[in-house]
Image (tube, rainbow, N blue to C red):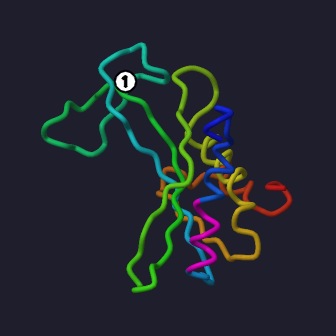
Amino acid sequence: MVTTGQWSWLALAGQLVRPVLLTLKPSAVYLVIDDTLTLRSSCKAPGSQIHHQHGNKPNLATYVRGQCWVSPAMIVRRLNCDPVALPLLSRLIPSAGNTGKLVAANTLVRSVYRLFSGIKVRVLVDSWYMRAVLSSRWNGADLR
């Protein structure tokens, strides 16, 4: 990958997931999907726009400039039973167009579901994602 200067982000995520699944042999995997805001000062950064800062952090304004990223993370238990979250992929939400957080979450689920073949996967999202547009597409027929 380094010598050719080309790689697949999905293949890279697979290289992370495969040894974890082989070592821990989980009966079920939790896939957590959430969004995060990366603060930016430049409006030239890709996907940079004004967002409402929901964290209510006292040192930040109510509205901040930043990039919104949607990421799935695999939650498993280590051998000592401590839980650990392993981020798999991230998708930048563009500042223009029809692509939003729900579309990004659907795309990411469709991208990574093959990595967990034969394992029960439980998808956890916060209430913002619980819309028919997102959850209705998670049956086997639509993901394949």
77 vs 138, left or right, is left
The mark tally for this picture is 1
Give the percent coordinates (x, y) of residue 95.
51, 22
Give the percent coordinates (x, y) of residue 8.
68, 42
Residue 61 found in image quarter: top left
Question: Residue 105 in magenta?
Answer: no
The residue at the point 63 percent across, 77 percent down is 22
Question: From the image, which quarter does the N terminus lie in?
Answer: top right
Which secondary structure class fits the magenta region best? helix
Q: Amino acid at mark 1?
A: Ile
Residue at disc 1, secondary structure: strand
The residue at the point 38 percent across, 38 percent down is 37
Nearer-the-camera pick, 44 or 138: 44
Residue under pointer 1:
50
Question: From the image, which quarter does the C terminus lie in?
Answer: bottom right
Give the percent coordinates (x, y) of residue 52.
33, 33
Nearer-the-camera pick, 51 or 3: 3
Give the percent coordinates (x, y) of residue 92.
53, 34
Q: Please give the range of residues in magenta.
A: 16-23
Nearer-the-camera pick, 98 or 37: 37
The residue at the point 36 percent across, 35 percent down is 38
Position of 60 relative to 44 (above/below): below
87 vs 10, left or right, is left
Q: Residue furthest front?
A: 3
The residue at the point 61 percent across, 74 percent down is 21
Position of 80 relative to 63 (above/below): below
